[in-house]
Image (spheres, helix red, strand yellow):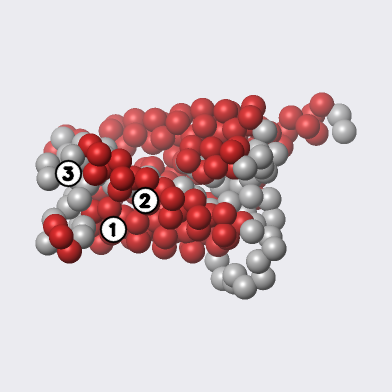
Amino acid sequence: MNRKDRILPIIKSLLAEFAGTFTLVILSCGTATAGGSLGEISLAFTFAVASSVAFSAHASGGHLNPAVTMGFLATGRLHPARAAAYIVVQCLGGIAAAGTLYGISPVAFVKRGLGATTLHTDIDPFQGTVIETIITFVLLVVVFSVCDTHRMDIGGSGPLTIGISVGACHLFAWTTPRMEGKERLSGPRFGPIYSDASRCGEG
């Protein structure tokens, strides 16, 4: 294999991670910035995840989030250099999406925070950390379950399955019966994403 054949797939995977993260952030956080309800924002994340992964998974595995990339690195499924590159372009994609959203949003929308995550006043940092840990654990378990090539019982759309998981974690993180429907967290969640079962972003 010549140098071009080795480098081109890497470039494609990095561009896929950048574009996928950009799409995910601008669609989901754009809904939050526009003042969407809890249900609308959760649905936006669900469909943004499914859409972003659908067009990026074949090139990069569709991680689109450092938590997923770190998971694959920790399990030996991703080379450290590629993991570091993925995380860099994911952050750049998120920053680019935030900048674009800032530029196209009315001032009144920008004042809402562009979908930035902040703790509800009734939630302390420890509780917030526990909530984040729970939803990240749930999403990573689902990601690895969907990516398990030894499982023959999973059918349907992988990206949509993970998208629904993201939506469910939004609903949990924002509201609980103990809070009587109040927001648990005042900004949108950013969850791990599906990786194509045939590749799972390994490399």
Query: At 57% across and 59% down in the image, what residue appears?
Result: 145
Q: Position of residue 90 (x, y in %)?
A: 49, 34
- Identify the residue under disc 2: 134
Q: Position of residue 51 (x, y in %)?
A: 48, 55
User: Badge 1: how crowded within 10 Å, few (<14), some, or many (20+)?
Assistant: some
Numbered mark located on residue 78 in the image = none
- Identify the residue under disc 1: 172
- The answer to which of marks 2 and 1 sits earlier in the sequence is 2
Q: Nearer the viewer, mark 2 or mark 1?
A: 2
> Is residue 31 rendered to the left or right of residue 61?
left
- Amino acid tagged 2: Ile
Q: How many marks?
A: 3
- Identify the residue under disc 3: 123
- Amino acid tagged 3: Ile
- The answer to which of marks 3 and 2 sits earlier in the sequence is 3
User: Badge 2: how crowded within 10 Å, few (<14), some, or many (20+)?
Assistant: some
> Is residue 29 rendered to the left or right of residue 71?
left
Image quadrant occupied by the C terminus = top right
- Amino acid tagged 1: Phe
Q: CA distance from mark 2 to mark 1?
A: 10 Å
Q: CA distance from mark 3 to mark 1?
A: 14 Å
Observer-nearest of 93 and 64: 64
Q: Mark 1 and mark 2 in contact (Cβ < 8 Å)?
A: yes
Query: At 57% across and 28% down in the image, what residue appears?
Result: 84
